[in-house]
Image (cartoon, rainbow, N blue to C red):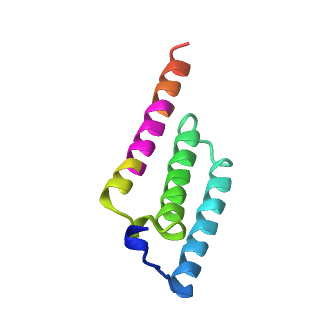
Amino acid sequence: MANNTTHTIEYKTLTKILLILLFLTFVTVEITSIHLGPLTVTVALLIAGVKAFLVLSNFMHLKYESLLLRIFVAMVFVLFALIIVITFIDYAFR
């Protein structure tokens, strides 16, 4: 953490984040029962990305870190998205 400071998050906020994560998990499971064709995996990955952002920013206190560290984490997400897109392109043209 920046400058060795301690950041506390209220239980009310943590409870809201937990309920949002549970809801998004339910949506991810239910999206598999809806026939969206190739978009099913895309929607599930987008929801997983939102859940990862919530966990990183709140439970891992990333929103209190320096801008440089947040940029590095964003670059990892961009790289992951690029790898997923390249994999889907390769799969589509086989």
The quadrant in which residue 91 appears is: top right
Q: Which residues are magenta?
A: 73-83
| 26 and 65: which is toward the camera | 65
x then y, percent, for residue 28: 62, 54
- Quarter of the image that includes the C terminus: top right
- Whether 94 is drawn above or below 55: the answer is above
Instruction: State left or right for residue 6 relative to residue 36.
Output: left
| 50 and 4: which is toward the camera | 4
x then y, percent, for residue 16: 54, 79
What residue is drawn where x is 59% and y is 66%?
21
What residue is drawn where x is 60% and y is 73%?
18
Secondary structure character of the magenta stretch overall: helix
x then y, percent, for residue 66: 34, 62
| 18 and 72: which is toward the camera | 72
| 34 and 13: which is toward the camera | 13
Can you name the residue that lies furthest to the top here?
94
The answer to if 35 sits in the magenta stretch is no
x then y, percent, for residue 2: 38, 68
Instruction: State left or right for residue 60 relative to residue 35.
Output: left
